[in-house]
Image: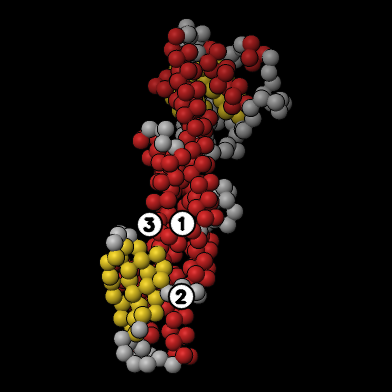
Amino acid sequence: MKLLSVGLTGISQDITMRLQQDCCSLMHEGFRIAIDEMNRGKYTFIGCNIVEGELSFRNYERVKDSLKNYVAKIVADFILANEEKTIIQRLIERNYHYFSKEEQKIIYDNSLKLLNDSSCCVIQDFSAGSRRKRIISRLMEYLDNHHELVVDGFVQFRLKDYRDNLAQIVDKAVDELMLDLEYQEFIRVLRYFINVQEPQVEETHVIIQGTSSFKLLDENGQSIDNQYLDSFDAHYSDEINYQDLLITALIAVSPHHVVLHNPYLPATNELIRTIKSIFEDRVMHCSGCELCKSKSVSQNIDSE
C-alpha cells in the first residue's frame, strides 16, 4: 500500500537514505515500511509503502502522520539546501540579466550572506530556522490532503510568499552592489584628482581624536591650515560628517605621504579603508609614537 510519494528532479539518494533512517522507529514497531524510487519523465518519485500486513484505520492514520512529519522535515531541508539557491540564481538571471556574469556572481554571493546573517533586517522572521518552520507547516497542510508531492511545483505554487521574500533579499544584494560600484567610482575620481594635483605639503600626520574630530600636522609637527579647516569646527558641527571633512582636507593638501596616528584605530575601520583606497601606497599607519600616546587620542573608535 502506497502511503506517500515525493517527486523531485536531481539527486534523490540523500532523501531516500534519510527517509529510510527516519522510518526505522516504525519498523521497530512491526510496520514494514519500504522506500522505493521510480522515474517518471524528468522526476524521480520516492514512494513510501507498507510491505505486508493489513493496517487498521487507527494504525494507518498513525503511520501516515509519522510519515508526513518525516517527509515534511526532509523536504523542507532539501528546499533550503538546494531549491533556495536555485530560486535566487533564477531571480538574478531573470531580473538582473543586464549585469555582467561577474556582477551576478557578486549578487548571488551577497544574497546568500544576507540569508545567513542573523542580524539582517531585510525581512522580519526570515532566519533559516524561521524559514524551515514555515515550509514544514505548509508541507504538513499540503500532505493532509494529498498523497503525492512534486517539490518544484510545491515551491512554485504553494510558497509564493517565500519566493517573494527571496526576491527582496536579492533586491537588497543588488542595492549593496550598486552602492559599492558608486563608492568605487567615487574613489577612482578622487584618486585621479590627487594624482594630477600638485602636492601642497610633503607629509601630513593625521591624528584621529575620538569619533568626531581630528588634527592635521605637517612634517614639522605644525598644524596645517586650509580653507576647509578654517571654515569648519569638527568638534561642534552636526551638519557634516567629520570623516567626509577629513577626506576633503587631505585631498585639498594632497600630501606625498599620509601618516595615520591612533594605535586603537583598526585597519578595517571604514575611514582607514577609504583613505588607503584614495591615497594607496602614500599611506602609513603608525602604531605607536608620542603623537599616538597623546591624551587627545581616543580609544573610542568605531571599527565599522
Residue under the image location 50 percent in, 50 percent down: 166
Between the residue at mark 1 and the residue at mark 3, the CA separation in whole angstroms equals 14 Å
Percent across and percent down for residue 114 are 49, 47
Q: Are marks 2 and 1 in contact (CB under 8 Å)?
A: no
Which quadrant of the view contains residue 225?
top right
Say if 190 sits above or below 124 in the image. Answer: above
Say if 139 sits above or below 286 in the image. Answer: below
Q: What label does residue 69 carry, if any?
A: 2
For residue 296, say whether it is visible: no
Percent across and percent down for residue 41 are 29, 61
In front here: 122 or 289? 122
Percent across and percent down for residue 297 are 59, 31
Between the residue at mark 2 and the residue at mark 1, the CA separation in whole angstroms equals 21 Å
Mark 1 lies on a secondary structure that is: helix
What is the crowding at mark 1: few (fewer than 14 residues within 10 Å), some, or many (at least 20)? few
Which quadrant of the view contains residue 240?
top right
Find disc 1 in the rendering and name its residue: 156
